[in-house]
Amino acid sequence: MSNLQVLLVAGTHGNEINAPWVFDQWKQKEDLIDKCGLKVVSVIGNPLAFEQGKRYLHRDLNRSFSKDLLNSENHNDLEVSRARQLLALYGPNGQNASQIAIDFHSTTACMGSSLVIYGRRPVDLAIVSLIQNRIGLPVYLHEGNPSQKGFLVEAWPCGFVVEIGPVPQGSLNSRIIQQTFQALKICLEEISKSIHSQSCFPDKLIVHRHLKSIDYPRDSSGEPIAYIHGDLEGRDWQPIRNGYPLFEYISGEKVRLSDNSFSDVVFPVFINEAAYAEKNIAMSFTKKEVWRFDDCWKDAFYRLINS
Amino acid sequence: MSNLQVLLVAGTHGNEINAPWVFDQWKQKEDLIDKCGLKVVSVIGNPLAFEQGKRYLHRDLNRSFSKDLLNSENHNDLEVSRARQLLALYGPNGQNASQIAIDFHSTTACMGSSLVIYGRRPVDLAIVSLIQNRIGLPVYLHEGNPSQKGFLVEAWPCGFVVEIGPVPQGSLNSRIIQQTFQALKICLEEISKSIHSQSCFPDKLIVHRHLKSIDYPRDSSGEPIAYIHGDLEGRDWQPIRNGYPLFEYISGEKVRLSDNSFSDVVFPVFINEAAYAEKNIAMSFTKKEVWRFDDCWKDAFYRLINS
């Protein structure tokens, strides 16, 4: 039997309250979601921020898992301490070691349900292939963005984010709860099938590969001076070309997509995510790519779950 | 010539950022919105909370204008101090006295644009009649709710709230900005016309009169144990009857509207407003009433603007 343990995290951002609510309901009624024979630990990522209904207290916990921060003696922000604590408890070498981490988030952007991976670890590509093959969720491959690093799931051997929207921060929502519930159920089912060598890997994986993020137009004091154009609002995952309006000034003047490196359509994501304004991100652009499924992903995944 | 001055407030809740943004654009470009010859002061209600992107720091500024709080020596919360300061500066007897206050808010609920008045002051009924007659906005008459008091506009001789949604907190949004801009423009035009005795008062006013608010179902520790039913989400201003599903448990069990005092349809508003969970309000119910326009409202309004 596999020694695999799956770490489920909700409330890594304390104002994303739907997944923590589902976890809490599950704790009260264990048969709500079948663990499918898996060893599972579920945890609130940032309980102090969650209690206060804030995204974070000192710094974004989901950017606090970089080696620099974890190893630095000068960083004792609450969230860096919490990152160290989570690793000591549930990290791959922790007291109660987990090998796979799944981190449940919500967004104010019209993203629907999606999976986010950080870089191209074969095990991550394998597991999101299984889930995409099962229920068709888009996969956002976040890579090549040195200003954004230290994501929680990167600190585990295998891991990904489940991102669901749109929902305002601090708001329970029927649709988001149902989608969180379904995604959680499917993740456990697919991991369990792998342990029993019953996985159905696809022959391809569709990824939305991160190209770049752009900021709102701002004035010299850093204040935004234009807003997301009404035509673009809510068009996450939908292709746009150079010339498409991105921002609008109150005068009606438009800022259009104009990037010489974009020869074809690009797919915007996280359009107007409320929490990203402070990170100078108005939206990110991705390229949709169809990748051949590589058996080495599967091999790496099987090695992990049977280790 | 009238000595009337109109106080325009935005950011009374610091995380409602669209109206403050419009005010800021207007400050930078004075001809963006025609003042129509009026004396106008525009101000950020809660600048400290606004800087931090929070609804408030110590207490809700828009519940801090009750006489009890303003006169109490024991209450020195930042927001009570700010309430006193706003009154000293722009109150009806302040240094730079204003007689009409218009307070611009946003909501996460699917309210569209609406006007909110507190009680039945003839001057308030007159001014919202003018605006409703011009652009048809619904009027929410908030009264008879002793647990919610001390609203900003109540401290001025005449005043109302412009409430626009849905928009997540902390998020600039094209639609909300346009609607704020339009509402602001229309308010100034209508007040200006009154001064020049060119107002076109209607013969009736449609009000959505507050009946009661209800809370989420909660457990003994105060945590919500059910969420707004998916069928109700987004149905603000739409009539429902006893039997309509209000909440849903994760088990699928429903809580239906069942109130013997509701013999006919009621109109829910502020459904699932994110900021109201802490106030134990999941939604409010209103009764839609058509009131005959009373000339005494107009007389009171004319007395005020010509005083």
Image (tube, coloured by chain):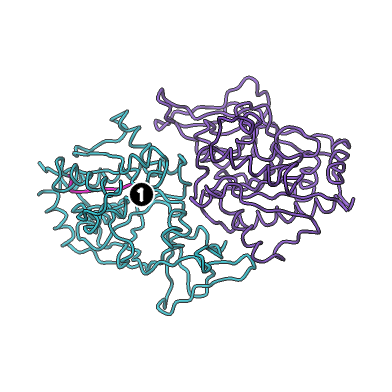
Chain colours: A purple, B cyan
Residue at point 62%, 62% (across, down): A25
Quadrant showing the C terminus of chain A: top right
Return the residue at label 1: B58
Residue B147 x %, y %? 33, 64
The secondary structure that dominates the magenta segment is strand
- Circle 1 marks a residue in which chain? B
In this rendering, is residue A180 above or below B290?
above
In this rendering, is residue B158 above or below B248?
above
Q: Which residues are magenta?
A: B98-104
Helix, strand or loop at mark 1: loop
Q: Report the front residue among B66 and B290.
A: B66
> Seen in the image, is B256 located left or right of residue B251?
left
Residue at point 74%, 36% (across, down): A207
In this rendering, is residue A218 above or below B173?
above
Residue at point 48%, 50% (across, down): A52
Q: Report the front residue among B56 and A224.
A: B56
Residue B249 x %, y %? 60, 67
Residue B49 x %, y %? 37, 42
Q: Amino acid at mark 1?
A: His
Instruction: Find out whether residue A133 is within the magenta segment.
Output: no
> Seen in the image, is B179 located left or right of residue B227?
left
Crowding around mark 1 (Cα neighbors within 10 Å: few <14, some 14 to 19, many 20+) is few
> Seen in the image, is A255 located left or right of residue A82?
left
Residue at point 52%, 59% (across, down): B233
Seen as rendered, the residue at the extreme bottom is: B260
Q: Quadrant of residue B90?
A: top left
Residue B195 x %, y %? 16, 46
> Seen in the image, is B108 located left or right of residue B231?
left
